[in-house]
Amino acid sequence: MIQKIKIAVDGHSSCGKSTLAKELAKELGYLYIDSGAMYRAITLFAIRKNLDQNTFQEIIPLLKEINLSFKKTNSGAYSIHLNGENVEDEIRRKPVANAVSRIAEIKEVRNKLVIEQRKFGKNGGIVMDGRDIGSVVFPNAELKLFITADVDIRTNRRYLEMTQKGVSLSKEEVRKNLMERDHIDSNRKESPLIKVKEAVEINNSNLNKKEQLNLVLKIVKETISNLS
Ligand code: DC
């Protein structure tokens, strides 16, 4: 039987990691987990509780009240549920996007989520995307990818995605949010975004989704055949 591996997909904000990870999991018949959605759902919980957004430290004693789960929708995609409520759409909106990096800096938040993320991967056959998957969550992942793209290209892609969803914002706002998140994610004390030395780096600025997926499927095949 072909071995079911763990695939860690890390990289910058809005470089298409989730799209790639989702398609890859579908092709391979693996579980897909969007770890960013978990940070976003905790952020939504904190916003709804009106916590002080400067530090969000008040979230720490409330973490035990938060239960996160992924449920399959009719379209076959997974949606994140916060204490039983489907919040997949709400976590993509501006208030959460603007605050999530500050929640992701908190050690206690990260500890809780890393424990949950590791449970999803205990039997292999998983693609998980995020910032610390190859470095912290699955340091033993058989394949680690580090995805990036030029900032102008990422801005255009995110702008298009948001405007298609009916969110009104300027390109400058999108670019500022991306750059701020990259800065915080890469410079925070707890589990910063890094490219671990064994990760395969893919800059997808000049690749379309199909080309990128085919490239990664080739890498997966090679990785699995090198294991046996
Ligand atoms: O992938 P995303 O844009 O949905 O992630 C939202 C935020 O969560 C992002 O600013 C970084 C943080 N994050 C993290 O710190 N670690 C992860 N494994 C995933 C996301």
Image (spheres, rainbow, N blue to C red):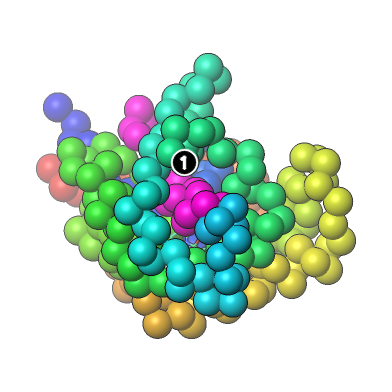
Q: Residue 128: percent from the left, percent from the top?
A: 38, 48
Vertical placement of 83 versus 168: above or below? above
Q: Is residue 224 left or right of residue 134?
A: left
Magenta segment: does it hold 38?
Answer: yes
In this view, the residue in front, 165 or 227, is 165
Residue drawn 50% across the image and 28% down it: 77
Q: How many marks?
A: 1
**Image quadrant where one finds the C terminus:** top left
In this view, the residue in front, 150 or 46, is 46
Vertical placement of 168 versus 25: above or below? below
How crowded pointer 1 is (Cα within 10 Å; few <14, some 14-19, many 20+) is rated as some
Residue drawn 74% across the image and 72% down it: 176
Q: Is residue 225 visible?
A: no
Magenta region, residue range: 25-45
Residue drawn 86% across the image and 51% down it: 168
Q: Residue 54: percent from the left, percent from the top?
A: 59, 77
Vertical placement of 9 versus 139: above or below? above
Magenta segment: does it hold 219?
Answer: no
Which residue sits furthest top? Answer: 74
Per the picture, the main secondary structure of the magenta-coloured stretch is: helix
Q: Is residue 34 visible?
A: yes
Q: Is residue 89 left or right of residue 192?
A: right
Kindly identify which residue carries mark 1: 82
Amino acid bearing label 1? Leu
Q: Secondary structure at mark 1?
A: strand
Mark 1, ligand 1, within 8 Å: the answer is: no
